[in-house]
Amino acid sequence: MTTTETEHVAIEVPKEKGGGLKNLPVYLAVGVIATLWTIPSLGLFISSLREARSIRASGWWNVFGHLFDATTWTLQNYRTALDQGFGNAFANSLAVTIPAVVIPITIAAFAAYAFAWMEFPGRNVLFVTVVGLMVVPLQMALIPILKIYTTFNINGTFPAIWLAHAGFGLPLAVYLLRNYMGSLPSSIIESAKIDGADHFMIFSRLVVPLSVPVLASFAIFQFLWVWNDYLVALIFLGNNPKVAVLTQSLATLSGRGEGALNLLPAAAFVTMILPLFVFFGLQRFFVRGLTAGSVKG
Amino acid sequence: MTTPPVLEEERVPVPRPPEEPATNAFVVWLLRFGSALVVPAVLVVFFFTFTFLRDEGVNKLLQVAVALGVGIIGVWALFWGMDRMVSLLPRRAAAAVRPFAFVGPAIVLLAFYLVYPAVNTAILSLQDARSKSFVGFDNYVTIFTKSHYLISIRNSIVWVVVVPFLAVVVGLAFATLADRLSKGAESLSKSLIFLPMAISFVGASVVWGFVYYFRAPGYGAQIGVLNAVWDGLGGQPIDWLRQQPWNNLFLMVILVWLQTGFSMVILSSAIKSVPVELQEAARIDGATEWQSFRRVVFPVIFSTVMVVWTTVVILVWKTFDIVFVMTGGRDGTQVVAETMVREFFTNRNNGIGAALALVLFIAVVPVLALNVKRFRAEEAMR
């Protein structure tokens, strides 16, 4: 049994992979690039865990002399950062991001279903128009929408920014979801119809559960996009620190220069913690989400 | 057959009143529009609930909870409610109206957030700073003659040439090399390159702010890695972000750092899809590693390279955060997307801001059209 298995594996890997002296230069090159790529964030992470005084006094690489010294490390910067507005900003980011992900997905899913499985006049023209809107950069929308928001005095409210993000994310969402839903076998939808299910039932019980992969991909793309967004928040939430999201608070803090040096690394990691968690937890969907986003305008 | 009882019931043919299509046409038409407007109308109501909540200074967690309730349950409930309402109509009318209840909210949102603003921005770009009177193409003339804007256009073009090139070349090289490592080493090293993708542009600016950190001699130790290395090599500390024109390059490095992971992951999966037999055959024919990459692998993955390239081009063209946070556009580092925000938001000049937005838009169209075309071709092949 074991011999056949080994043979099988040996056949499956025709390319030379893994160890061997021949691969040493490759390992070295990869190692150098990976190290270069890691140093900036590693340095910031180490800084975030140092005493405020040491951050100002010496570079982060000095910790390597006292790695096991208890006085080298502290969580105080994180505590201070969370107290000085970053805890509040984290909650704001959640309050902005979750609805700004769910609303466009829901609206796009219904529209995508209609485009894929319902007959109505103007269907193709409408769909092409929606997809064509991907070329409009959101910069085009800022001035007119801000004017309207100011007129109705809803600038700086969460629903205002949810709907803005929803609008900007819709063309891509409709496009991706419609492509996916349209590729579902028509036989299952026809047979559900024969069984007497109406469109709402087919959509919610059949099409949505079958579309989970594409929904997850778009959700992750939109989550990252909204969570990491600075421009839309800057324009539509404004300067009110009570509603500021993490990117705004971090940008403000970084503008304070030398005075904020001790808090900046910890604050930066507070803004990154959730996307990093998503990154490690859902890497497969994460990659798909990014690939799918390659056509966003 | 074990069909659920509910479905059985609905399958029973119900006697329907005779249909009168001609007279109802207008009503159906009206209903289509009405159903499309329900969701936005109710969302407007949400605005006011939420403004109320905010003004009361209520608990943050409660706010988040309300946000979740509105966002998740609310929108779903709206669609459900609309669907029930449509079902109350006579059968024929319901069938005609229902698609619009499904599509309508998306169309209304898009019309409000993209179509109307795009048209409005085009008009604003022909008006003065306060949008009071028409000035013809004056704003465009200003953009293409005054050196401040010309520099931002020049810088943007350099960004668009340099960043995608480096991101694709480094990503491709890394993907090719990592492909030869053992499985564990490959996924670890790829994760390290890819990790910055999760970081916001503002976060990345802070990360690199510490790399470029500068203190004038006599104002304390150099805590930035770059100046420490430079110091070790015997140089005087340098304020990297004020060295024209090289500061532009230092800012571009940040975006390369962020985007290489994206190109690496996509190109890596493309490389893995190249048939092994092809490369083996090349090797047997005596091709060197480089020749086999250049003549066998690269032609196969070329269309993916183009997709990655154009994607990064569009992203770079519209990136404003890095310049905005790192230098604020000072010392000759301004780019179009950043100048646009500054003109409209800081200088309150709607005319120039709108004209710059239009410049951004027009430059994107051909690239994105190409990208969508390729994406569709690829989808079709799947």
Image (cartoon, coloured by chain):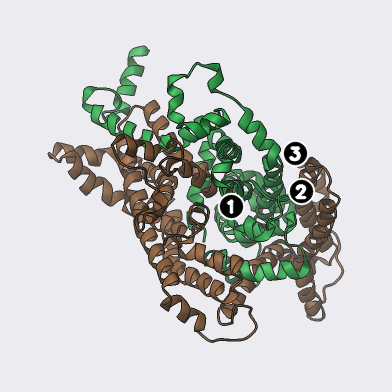
Palette colour of chain A: green
**Given the image, on which type of amino acid does mark 2 rest?**
Ala
Q: Nearer the viewer, mark 3 or mark 2?
A: 2
Read off the residue under disc 1: A229
Q: Is residue B141 above or below residue B294?
A: below
Residue B374 location in percent, x, y?
41, 59
- Quadrant of res B257: top left
Would you say the residues marked 3 and 1 are in contact, meaning their CB atoms lie under 8 Å apart?
Answer: no
**Chain letter for the residue marked with disc 1 in the picture:** A
Q: Is residue B209 above or below residue A53?
A: below
Q: Which mark is residue B67?
A: 2
Residue at 60% from the left image edge and 46% from the top image edge: A253
Read off the residue under disc 3: B2
Q: Earlier in the sequence, mark 3 or mark 2?
A: 3
In this rendering, position of residue A275 left or right of residue B106: left
Mark 1: few/some/many CA within 10 Å (<14, 14-19, 20+): many
**Given the image, on which type of amino acid does mark 3 rest?**
Thr
Closer-to-camera residue (B277/A109):
A109
Q: Nearer the viewer, mark 2 or mark 1?
A: 1
- Labels 3 and 1 within one chain: no
* Viewer can see residue A288: no
Would you say the residues marked 2 and 1 are in contact, meaning their CB atoms lie under 8 Å apart?
Answer: no
Residue A101 location in percent, x, y?
65, 50
**Chain letter for the residue marked with disc 3 in the picture:** B
Q: How many marks?
A: 3
Work out how far the residue at label 3 is from the one at label 1, CA to CA, in angstroms: 50 Å
**Chain letter for the residue marked with disc 2 in the picture:** B
Residue B104 location in percent, x, y?
71, 65
Palette colour of chain B: brown
* Viewer can see residue B236: yes
Q: Is residue B361 above or below residue A292?
A: below
